[in-house]
Image (tube, rainbow, N blue to C red):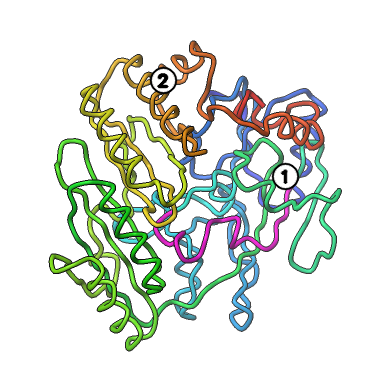
């Protein structure tokens, strides 16, 4: 992404001044944190100014007693985690953009704008569930705040939820307030290998019936390996974890293996890793939780038929996983596989979002009359929201669904 200018503001007020000036001059602006998610969605139509949030850093307030933290948007999640840990608290967002030492990838603002999720989604939800306040700068320089001590949201919108997953198309996030959770006293991981996604899905359903309340129920598989791995993370007090782990092991059977988790190094190498390499195509697949296993089997069948190398990895217990296509392929078989997978998920009211992909994949989707987002039933409503917040299409024009 080439831009004529780069701005690095240090405060909400400076962001407001920059946005006002950019709008007055007819410039197109794309907010940027560490750029770990800048390729997500559609490529913007035009960029004059990159608004870099790397100087909007720091924890403004950490109220440990209320389990709340106010953070500037450019703060890396790793820095936030390091600030919270001495008080034995955490922001429960173990995203898949994390390296194996446990540091989370990206910034606070980028995480809100892109809405990634990881294993802890099973117990704690997504960014949308943990965000309780937000400060944003709109395209014309207006500063809007919602949540926290604000009783009424701006213009009647739930502003925080609107900005989650908006990919920088509605405004520039400058601060966020999060609900925190205690760091658990103990943790264990129970893993087992299975031959089919449907069997993994059966295990997930059995765990729900057993009411063991895991923090995560994950799956990992690759098209060039026959078996799939199911991983169940159990966290809490030492006594409670011991009891619940035994219950999980009974569900998963005699082949289940139990590992004490004292830190990220005890987690499997795949636990927090993206499903695709940096040059590949990453798809976020969402289906009803009860259908996750069978849809993963469908992905593996598509991979076997097309010869694509596909890794599936994600939240088996929630119904959201990533299918990563790694390796060098012509665009056409990859695009055809994406469209076939969309046909499969549509039967279950699911979706396939192309989080990141080479440019020729986006061009191939466009030739078929679609884009990274696929069919969006609420597209008309989204267009009206964009017009309300950014009538001049100043912010990341064309990056969102339908070219919004």
The answer to whether 225 is drawn above or below residue 364 in the figure is below
Residue 340 is situated, as x and y percent measured from the top left of the image, at 39, 24
Q: Of marks 1 and 2, which one's residue comes earlier in the chain?
A: 1
Left or right: where 105 falls relative to 9:
left
Magenta span covers which residues?
118-136
Residue at the outermost bottom position: 239
Quadrant containing the C terminus in the rendered view: top right
Residue at 21% in and 28% down? 304
The answer to whether 234 is drawn above or below residue 269 in the figure is below
What mark, if any, has residue 361 been given in the picture? 2
| Residue sitting nearer the eye, 385 or 169 | 385
| Residue sitting nearer the eye, 201 or 126 | 201
Residue at 74% in and 67% down? 148
Left or right: where 46 falls relative to 358:
right
Res 108 quadrant in image: bottom right
Residue 176 is situated, as x and y percent measured from the top left of the image, at 65, 59
| Residue sitting nearer the eye, 265 or 27 | 265
Left or right: where 310 falls relative to 171:
left
The answer to whether 304 is drawn above or below residue 250 in the figure is above
What mark, if any, has residue 342 been given in the picture? none
* Secondary structure type for disc 1: helix
- On the image, numbered disc 1 is attached to which residue? 15
How far apart are the two marked residues, 1 and 2, measured between alpha carbons?
Answer: 34 Å
Dot 1 alpha-carbon crowd within 10 angstroms: few under 14, some 14 to 19, many 20 or more: many
Res 240 quadrant in image: bottom left
| Residue sitting nearer the eye, 387 or 263 | 387
Residue 346 is situated, as x and y percent measured from the top left of the image, at 48, 32
Q: How many marks?
A: 2
């Amino acid at each position: 992404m080439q831009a004529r200018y780069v701005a690095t503001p240090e405060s909400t007020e400076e962001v407001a001044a920059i946005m006002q000036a950019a709008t007055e001059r007819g410039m197109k602006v794309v907010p940027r944190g560490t750029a770990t998610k800048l390729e997500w969605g559609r490529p913007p139509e035009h960029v004059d100014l990159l608004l870099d949030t790397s100087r909007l850093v720091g924890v403004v307030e950490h109220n440990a007693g209320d389990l709340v933290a106010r953070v500037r948007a450019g703060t890396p999640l790793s820095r936030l985690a390091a600030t919270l840990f001495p008080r034995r608290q955490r922001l429960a967002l173990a995203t898949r953009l994390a390296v194996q030492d446990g540091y989370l990838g990206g910034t606070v603002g980028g995480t809100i704008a892109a809405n990634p999720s990881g294993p802890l989604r099973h117990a704690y939800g997504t960014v949308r569930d943990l965000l309780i306040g937000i400060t944003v700068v709109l395209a014309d320089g207006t500063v809007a705040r919602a949540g926290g001590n604000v009783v009424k949201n701006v213009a009647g919108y739930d502003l925080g939820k609107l900005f989650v997953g908006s990919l920088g198309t509605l405004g520039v996030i400058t601060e966020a307030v999060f609900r925190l959770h205690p760091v658990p006293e103990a943790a264990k991981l129970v893993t087992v290998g299975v031959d089919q996604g449907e069997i993994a899905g059966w295990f997930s359903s059995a765990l729900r019936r057993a009411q063991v309340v895991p923090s995560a129920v994950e799956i990992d598989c690759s098209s060039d390996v026959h078996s799939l791995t199911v991983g169940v993370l159990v966290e809490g007090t030492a006594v409670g974890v011991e009891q619940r782990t035994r219950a999980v092991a009974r569900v998963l059977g005699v082949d289940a293996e139990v590992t004490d988790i004292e830190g990220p190094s005890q987690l499997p190498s795949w636990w927090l890793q993206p499903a695709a390499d940096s040059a590949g195509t990453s798809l976020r697949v969402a289906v009803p939780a009860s259908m996750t296993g069978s849809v993963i089997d469908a992905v593996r069948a598509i991979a076997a038929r097309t010869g694509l190398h596909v890794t599936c990895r994600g939240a088996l217990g929630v119904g959201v996983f990533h299918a990563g296509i790694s390796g060098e392929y012509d665009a056409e078989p990859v695009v055809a596989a994406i469209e076939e997978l969309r046909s499969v998920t549509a039967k279950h009211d699911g979706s396939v979002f192309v989080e990141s992909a080479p440019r020729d994949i986006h061009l191939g989707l466009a030739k078929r009359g679609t884009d990274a987002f696929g069919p969006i039933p609420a597209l008309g409503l989204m267009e009206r929201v964009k017009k309300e917040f950014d009538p001049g299409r100043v912010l990341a024009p064309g990056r969102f669904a339908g070219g919004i």
